[in-house]
Each structure stands twice: as C-alpha cells, then as structure tokens.
Image (cartoon, helix red, strand yellow):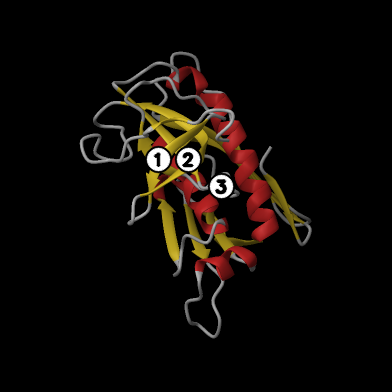
Amino acid sequence: MPTIDLQRTKFKFSVLPPKLFSRGHWVRTEISVDNEYVKYTEIGENVLRTELEEWIFAMFRLLAGAYAKEYSLSFERAGLAVDFYPHMVNGEEVSREERRRNDCVMVIRMLMRSSDKKRLLGGVYSFLLHREDIQTFASALREEFDAAFAKFERNKGKYLFIGVSPKGYKGCNYWYLDPTKTVKKGDHVWVRMGRRNVEQIVYVDCVKYCNDDTAPYDPNRVKRILRKATDGEI
C-alpha cells in the first residue's frame, strides 16, 4: 500500500480494485491524510488510467536521472499536482550520472474537498518526498496498479508496447513496440537505445496492450524490439 509517513503525517494514495463492469479508463483510488489535526479520506474515480501511468513513469525517470530540469504533472479532477525536482548544483544542471547518485525531490500538492465536492477544506496541503520515499512510493503504486489492471491489459489491443530499462535501472521505462506480441514482464530483449541507436540488452518492466487511441506513442514511428535475449546473453 503506497503510504508515506512524513513528520507524523501519513499520506496514502492507493489503487483499489475496479468496480464490476468497469471499462478500465478511470482508476478507483483512495487518497487520505492522517495526522494529529486532520483525518481525511476520499475514494473515487478521479484519475485516468493513462494519467496514473504517466505519474508512475515520471517517478522512475526522476530516480534514474532522466530529468535535467523541474517537471510537473496535474490531475485536476483529483485536486492533485506533482512537481519533480532533480539534483542540481547552485541551480545549474549536472550530468545524468550525478543526478542518479544524488538526492531528488517530488512534491505532491493536494486540495481536500467536502464529500459533495462543492467546498474546499482548508488550503493546499503539500507533501515532500526524497529519493528513498519516492522509490518506496513508486514501487508500491506500480505493484497495485499492475494488479488492479491486469485483466484489462491481457491480450487486448492491436499493439503490444513494452516498457524497458537499461541495465541496472529497473523502473525507468522507455517504450518499444513488440510486433510478435510474445514478450512478457521480466524478459530481457535487444533494442536500439538512445539517439545513437546503440544495440543493447534491456529489462522489460511492464507490457501494455493498446489500440491507436491508447498507445503511448505513434505505433508507426516508435522503435521496435530487435529480438528476445538468450539466457547466455543475459
């Protein structure tokens, strides 16, 4: 369960099982704040599945040093905004390797609302997470998300997209297309990575069945995997 305890305030953002007959477009979530003065819980379908995927994706990219500058996401229906701050020195960008080695920050800002959604309860609450908390939160959220939406992803859609990570950086997804539709989470595959198209073996973090309107990238332009890696190559 993605729960973070920050200076005696517990913040929880949890993915709940979808309702019966759900089509899987919206995520059913439980958001709560619990401390000495506030006990707040909101359960509802206020975040799109694609939005939550983007948040999870962004957290792992922050941890892997992919962002050189501040990056933000906003979930208006849920009353949430998230800011990502990579490691910098005196306000200046540093190398990706330095960003990977040093601390980074994610700030979650949220509005608490009345049960009828017509009134705001107080101001904006902010929660600041450092690298270790981000890793814990992102991993738990990914696990809950995968479990909740497994039945919607399995063998549905014209295309199979796979999220991969370079060696040593599991969780940092780069999307590729698998024309064979045979790759599974946990496999290793050969791809052409980066601007120089260096061929290398990468780990498959997740798989996503898509149609044209749900694909993370244009299926006609995205890179394709070359082949699965053998045990000896891994």
Quadrant where the C terminus is found in the figure: top right
Q: Which residue is mark 2?
A: 164
> Where does the image place residue 3, in percent across and percent down from the top left?
70, 45
Q: CA distance from mark 1 to mark 2?
A: 9 Å
> Residue, x 32% and y 35% (percent of image)?
224
> Residue, x 31% and y 32% (percent of image)?
214
Say which of 143 and 81 sits in front: 143
Cβ atoms at labels 1 and 2 below 8 Å apart: yes
Quarter of the figure with residue 223:
top left
The amino acid pointed to by label 3 is Lys
Q: CA distance from mark 3 to mark 1?
A: 12 Å
Observer able to see residue 87:
yes
Q: Which residue is mark 3?
A: 167
Quadrant where the N terminus is found in the figure: top right
User: Going by the picture, which residue comes out furthest to the front?
Assistant: 232
Q: Residues within 10 Å of mark 3 (few under 14, many from 20)?
A: few
Q: Which residue is mark 1?
A: 191
> Where does the image place residue 209, in percent across and percent down from the top left?
38, 25
Say which of 111 and 226 sits in front: 226
Q: Secondary structure under badge 1? A: strand
Q: CA distance from mark 3 to mark 2?
A: 10 Å
